[in-house]
Image: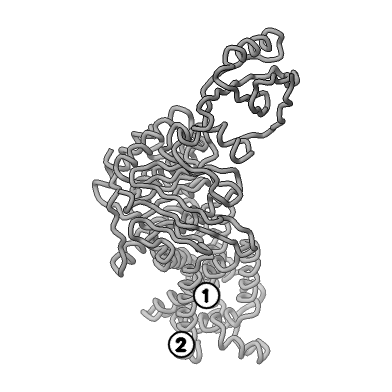
Amino acid sequence: MEATGFRAEGITKVHRNGVLANDGISLSVAPGEVFGLLGPNGAGKTTLVKQIIGLLRPTSGRLWLGDYDLVSDPDAARQLCSYLPQAQMPIDGFRVREAIQLTGRIRGGRGPALRRRTDELIDALDIGPWRDTLGVKLSGGVKRLAGFAMAVVAPGSLVILDEPTNDVDPLRRRLLWDVIRQLGQAGTAVLLVTHNVLEAERSVDRLAIIDHAKLIADGTPSALKADDRDNLRLQVMVAPGAVTPPLPGWVLSSTRVGHNLMASIAEGDAATAITWARGLVRDGTAEEYALAATTLEDIYIRVTGAQPEADAAEPARAGS
Amino acid sequence: MNATAAAVRVRKGPRRWLRSYRVMLRWELTSLRLFIPVTIAVQVLAGAGFAVGIGLLRDLSSQEAMFLATGTAVITLVLVGLILGPQIIAQQKANDTYDFLWSLPVPRTAAAAAWTTMTVLIGIPGMIAAVAVAGWRYHLNFHLGWSLIPAVLLTAGTAALIGYALAHIIGNPMITMSITQALIFFVIGFSPVTFPDERLPAWLDRLHDWLPFKPMATVVRDALSPGLGTDVGRAYAVLLAWFVAMVVLNAVVLGRRE
């Protein structure tokens, strides 16, 4: 199976202005696998993607899809890979159905099979009411779903999706993930670029984290969490206006994002932690708390030192 | 659902090129569906307005009127190519859709050919309007022969390819638009298109022997009013050389990867 999948071998890209965007990145995506590419803004994810689809040439390294050398044959790369960019698709002048079908034709689809596939996607994503609506009149979420359908209508061997769920409502997000799963079942490799760590944890088979141009971690979500297997995450919603409470010694590490205080604790301290958090709620310092298994987000924060989708962060002080 | 994935055949060759050309032409026409009627209306107004407006300055002799009419036809054909390409591509770069369009699996030259075809089609109604209105206003009789076809296609096609190449070569869309606007002023004001070449200083006229705009005027003028243009064979040769050079330049520019 692996032989027909996607492989990046030691991809390094130095931009003309001297900026090092990718530094020796190697990864592989098997047919049927959903692979997440995570990393903070500016980490080099989009640069990597642009090299795969032949818009940029690597400074060094090789890109393979099965036996095809994507670096030496960008025309083949574009036929084999389909791409949903992070920006909205240019479909103001298109009706939804027309945009999906015409992209399918550009990607080599034809006839009744293409029409059927278009209608199936429209139904699967529940955007039937906008089937004949012009792109210019669509809401951001429906336009995003139409763009997603354009990217997967004739998917090729590798589908690259850059933040596919942006602007999409929670119900239709699920439908979108169902379609991605079906792509995998049909043998397409899926490369998912995202900042949304929680969503990725639920949806990907394997993932890699890129930071400062380098690949710093990769594996299955559970393998990446292995080091934190015996730990739990205590989440406390600090009441508006309240200061961060002093943290007890059994807290292993912590971060505060807005009102959300997250602490990593050992499994054995769970009962003590609940008592402590209840006390905070009782005296009005916190509104609520939750104790849960460690998530990929905790790992992501630990390895990148960044906070996904954080707009305000203030580290909590270690206390008594 | 039946996603037809795994085995994807990589296609090459002329049949794929033609198929890509056809489907990209449809893509371009649909993509600008909301914009094309307005552009054509502006073109028609500009062509007709220019043809009539200049004549309001003073009474024109019939030969002067013929120069103006045929020159205006050329300007309407050139304007679309020089303005539309840079403007649309500037927009694509500004809203980040440029990368998606260039990730589509079509030969770059087929996409460029589709774009050029659309631009030529958009330019023709304005040209017809200019010629028709001038004919009515100045009582001119035009010759409508087959030579009009290569003259119009070469003129509009070369202009479209110049605009397209500039839009892709220059990274900053604002600079591209400034350059093409300067080019338009050069074509209207300093090129022997709507006036005879003897009105220009000799050095500028000599320069125009090698630029595409005077040959464009010569071939269109000769097609609409045989005998009015001089050195027509040479004009076709120069214009054809420009056309081929622009095809090659676009192929090189669109094929490069940073």
Secondary element at image label 1: helix
**Numbered badge on residue A259:** none
Q: Within 10 Å of the Cα at label 1, are there few (<14), some (14-19), or many (20+) other Cα atoms?
A: many
**Which residue shows up at 69% across the image and 32% down it?**
A313
Asked whether the viewer can see residue B117, the reply is no
**Amino acid on which disc 1 is placed:** Val
Asked whether the viewer can see residue A207, the reply is yes
Which quadrant is the C terminus of chain A positioned in? top right
Q: Within 10 Å of the Cα at label 2, are there few (<14), some (14-19), or many (20+) other Cα atoms?
A: few
Do tag 2 and tag 1 residues touch (Cβ < 8 Å)? Answer: no
**Amino acid on which disc 2 is placed:** Ala
Q: Nearer the viewer, residue B100 or B247?
A: B100
**Numbered badge on residue B237:** 2
Identify whether A320 is placed above or below A91.
above
Identify whether A13 is placed above or below A125.
below
Q: Mark 1 points at which residue?
A: B74
